[in-house]
Image (spheres, grey):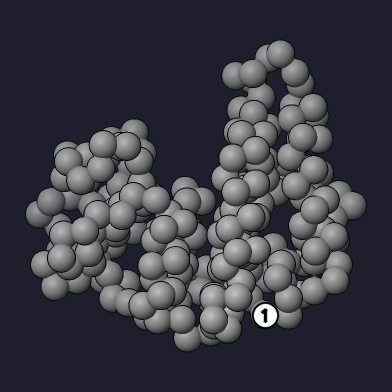
């Protein structure tokens, strides 16, 4: 195998963050788009988690944690200094990801699928999500991006999940008291990098011609 392979699902926020970092690093990868409900046997053999993203390196190493893929990609090549000088952004980014991937993601899932969690109404779950949104709003009121005036791996790691939050009830979000988060999110969604990564591809089949990105 001469090119790393990424098993991915374009609307998955974990896959988005991994693919964004890989794209920015300039590393050529073979992209294999899958259905979450029907992950191919080839991918299941690689990772017992039965989730994506899965990155298979040319030496056979398998990476199945999106944040690990982000860091690995940028360690190979970081043209826009997303890690910061001497990896100075990494520790602060790690703290944000810890909140995002655990407490916020749990609240987000309840907000998205409130009908599956009838012990509270959707507004209750949205308010829980807003604790993290308010934290981001405060950060973005001071800087253009989460860790300063330049885009970093923190923004890339968090924004796909904030995108999901916004689109649960877009009308509410557009009128919400979070103008800096709105502006930040809009700029990232409209970026050429995100538009490139978010292109739609056919579901991968073993006999398909490889798609490189």
Please name whichever residue, 5 or 143, is drawn nearer the observer in this view of the structure: 143
Query: Residue at horizontal 64%, vertical 29%?
Result: 110
Q: In this rendering, is residue 42 above or below 207?
A: above
Give left or right: position of 35 versus 199.
Answer: left
> How many numbered marks does the figure carry?
1
Q: Is residue 165 visible?
A: yes
- Residue 155: image quadrant is bottom right
Query: Residue at horizontal 22%, vertical 39%?
Result: 44
**Residue 129 at x, y = what percent?**
74, 39
**Residue 158 at x, y = what percent?**
61, 57
**Residue 37 at x, y = what percent?**
34, 33
Q: In this rendering, is residue 72 above or below 148?
A: above
| Pointer 1 residue | 150
**Residue furthest top as drawn:** 119
**Residue 170 at x, y = what percent?**
73, 47
Give left or right: position of 13 versus 62.
Answer: right
- Residue 39: image quadrant is top left
Query: Residue at horizontal 11%, vertical 67%?
Result: 1
Q: Is mark 1 on a helix, strand or loop?
A: loop
Q: In this rendering, is residue 185 above or below 113?
A: below
Q: In this rendering, is residue 78 above or below 39?
A: below
**Residue furthest right as drawn:** 177
Q: Is residue 40 visible?
A: no
Query: Residue at horizontal 32%, vertical 37%?
Result: 49
Give left or right: position of 188 versus 55.
Answer: right
Please state, as top left, top right, bottom left or bottom right, where the C terminus lies in the image. Answer: bottom left
Task: Give the crowd class for mark 1: few <14, some 14-19, many >=20 residues within 10 Å.
Answer: some
């Amino acid at each position: 195998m001469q090119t790393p392979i990424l098993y991915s699902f374009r609307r998955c926020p974990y896959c988005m963050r991994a693919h964004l970092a890989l794209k920015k690093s300039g590393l050529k990868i073979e992209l294999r788009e899958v259905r979450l409900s029907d992950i191919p046997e080839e991918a299941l053999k690689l990772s017992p988690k039965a989730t994506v993203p899965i990155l298979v390196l040319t030496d056979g190493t398998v990476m199945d944690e999106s944040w690990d893929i982000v860091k690995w990609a940028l360690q190979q090549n970081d043209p826009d200094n997303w890690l910061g000088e001497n990896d100075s952004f990494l520790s602060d980014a790690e703290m944000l990801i810890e909140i995002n991937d655990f407490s916020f993601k749990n609240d987000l899932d309840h907000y998205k699928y409130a009908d599956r969690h009838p012990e509270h109404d959707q507004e209750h779950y949205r308010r829980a999500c807003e604790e993290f949104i308010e934290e981001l709003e405060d950060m973005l009121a001071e800087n253009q991006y989460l860790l300063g005036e330049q885009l970093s791996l923190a923004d890339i790691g968090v924004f796909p999940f904030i995108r999901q939050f916004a689109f649960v009830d877009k009308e509410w979000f557009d009128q919400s008291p979070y103008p800096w988060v709105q502006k930040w999110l809009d700029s990232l969604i409209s970026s050429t990098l995100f538009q490139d990564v978010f292109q739609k591809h056919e579901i991968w089949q073993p006999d398909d011609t490889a798609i490189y990105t």
